[in-house]
Amino acid sequence: MPWRRPSGGEGRSAFVFLLPWLIGIVFLTTLPMVGSFVLSFTNYDLLSTPHWVGLQNYERMMFYDPRYIKSLEVTTTYVLVSVPLAVAVALVIAVALSKQTRSANTFRSIFYLPSLLGGSVAIGVLWRQIFGSTGLVNMVLGGLGFQTTSWIGDPRYALWTLILLHVWQFGAPMVIFLAGVRQIPKDIVDASVMDGASPVQRFFRITLPLLSPLILFNLVMQTITAFQAFVPAYVISNGSGGPVDSTLFYTLYLYLEGFRNFHMGYAMAMAWVLLAIIAVFTAISFYASRFWVYYES
């Protein structure tokens, strides 16, 4: 159909329908972002007039705040460990459930359920009960004769319980992998079977390369989600980031500085640095993808 310039009435109608989105993008996204960036260069406590301090918030962050460095270390460990594990588990489970069996849909629903619940407060409370000193994990270990400990009260293990929680919520990437497995041409699989390829060889030579674009997508999305993790750490540590700052996530420390210590200018500077960190990780992922992601075109 040839392109036709919209009439005046059609243009006005289109503008009216777009108006809610334009109002939202300007007043709820763009202006708050600009305001946040400007206030990141100020000393602002939410109650008095902001005072311009230049780069002092960023200098404090990098050179004079050991808790900020600790939060960065905790969050980076959390991302680098939990994201690859969650994607790997999702991929393996998706391949295992890709065959049409009578119970496949039931297991898919069961595995997807944790992701449906998301990072809710209820899940955080449940996790705290399971890994508490009198929780289910210690009951099982104690029953088997192993020594028990407070998994969320010991700084050596507290972060790993949160990593386990993130890995447990692998349902969303699993669904994406399931859709990808179904798109693999059947004739390629049949040809490999006739050539005598084992299931392991088919996984590494056919399934994995053809799913590599989806692996990249899930890695990027899971990385962004992991950097923004807040609720599990807040609930399990009672909002302190403890014990001994072992679960002091970046966003949790940002919240503490902004809304408990009223260092809102400093918190906004932290938010912009977090945005830059996520952008760098995403750019590195896309740059590295040229060496391992396979595109049919």
Image (cartoon, rainbow, N blue to C red):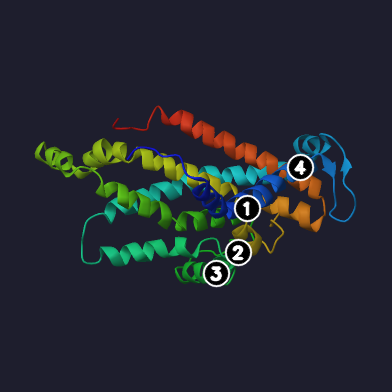
Residue bearing the label numbered 3 = 126
Q: Amino acid at mark 1?
A: Gly
Percent position of residue 228, x then y: 60, 50
Q: CA distance from mark 3 to mark 1?
A: 36 Å
Mark on residue 35? none
| Mark toward the start of the polypeptide (2 vs 1) | 1
Residue bearing the label numbered 1 = 24
SS for dot 2 = loop
| Mark toward the start of the polypeptide (3 vs 2) | 3
* Front in this rendered view, residue 121 or 137: 121
Q: CA distance from mark 2 to mark 4?
A: 26 Å
Residue name at image x 39 percent, y 51 percent: 89
- Other-residue count near label 4 (Cα within 10 Å), few / some / many at <14 / 14–19 / ≥20: few
Q: Nearer the viewer, mark 3 or mark 1?
A: 1
Percent position of residue 52, x then y: 87, 39
* Residue 1 location, quadrant: top left
* Front in this rendered view, residue 284 or 22: 22
| Mark toward the start of the polypeptide (3 vs 1) | 1
Residue 45 horizontal side relative to residue 278, left or right: right
